[in-house]
Image: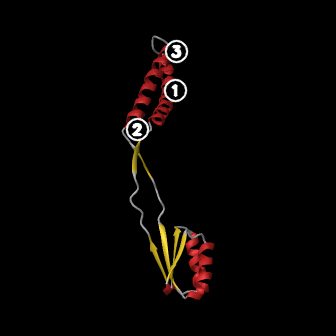
Amino acid sequence: MNLFATFQQSIEIEQALAELENSFVSKDQIVIIYMENEPAQVQPTSRTKEIHSNSFEVGMACATGSAVIGASIGFVLAWGPIIWGLIFVIIGFTIGYCLYYFRKKDKVITLRQKKEAEILVIIQCTEILVPPIKEILWKYQALTVGQSS
């Protein structure tokens, strides 16, 4: 008689197999088959809100640094530190925003639907051992358990 059980890939499989090998069946009577999933669906998505938000933050950081530099230079120049600080704020924000935005805009983020592969365990045993083996398989979170004669 053959018993079939499917599991999600996890440590419970190893525990179930170890208990079965110690109690009821030998390694020669167990076959493990790793099932493959179909390729994941790729869905392109747009993250424009996140790109604009991050671009604004980078622009503000560049504007702050540029304002300090502009104000420092403004002490020497004709219009003074306040005017040159404001001019450098605008320049720094524009440069920081544009560099980040145009660098990240072209990258399309793809989401993959990842499905974990299942594992099929086939156990050859006698009819007397079927109930205790089934009990062990259910104990270790088998997804399905079936039998054939």
Q: Quadrant of residue 20?
A: bottom right
Amino acid at the residue labelled 2: Lys
Select label 1 or label 2 by which is in front. Answer: 2
Query: What residue is shown with label 3?
Result: 82
3 or 2: tag closer to the N-terminus: 3
Above or below residue 108? Residue 24 is below
Residue 140's x, y, as percent?
A: 61, 72
Above or below residue 60? Residue 81 is above
How far is mark 3 from mark 1, CA to CA? 13 Å
Amino acid at the residue labelled 3: Ile
Q: Regarding mark 1 in the picture, which secondary structure is present there?
A: helix
Above or below residue 47? Residue 8 is below
Q: How many marks?
A: 3
Disc 3 to disc 2: CB gap under 8 Å: no
Query: What residue is shown with label 1?
Result: 64
- Badge 2: residue crowd in 10 Å (few <14, some 14–19, many ≥20): some
3 or 1: tag closer to the N-terminus: 1
Disc 3 to disc 1: CB gap under 8 Å: no
Residue 21's x, y, as percent?
A: 57, 84
Residue at 58% from the left image edge and 80% from the top image edge? 18
Residue 81's x, y, as percent?
A: 51, 16
Query: What residue is shown with label 2?
Result: 104
Q: From the viewer's side, name the closer residue of 79 and 95.
A: 95
- Badge 1: residue crowd in 10 Å (few <14, some 14–19, many ≥20): some
Residue 50's x, y, as percent?
A: 48, 36
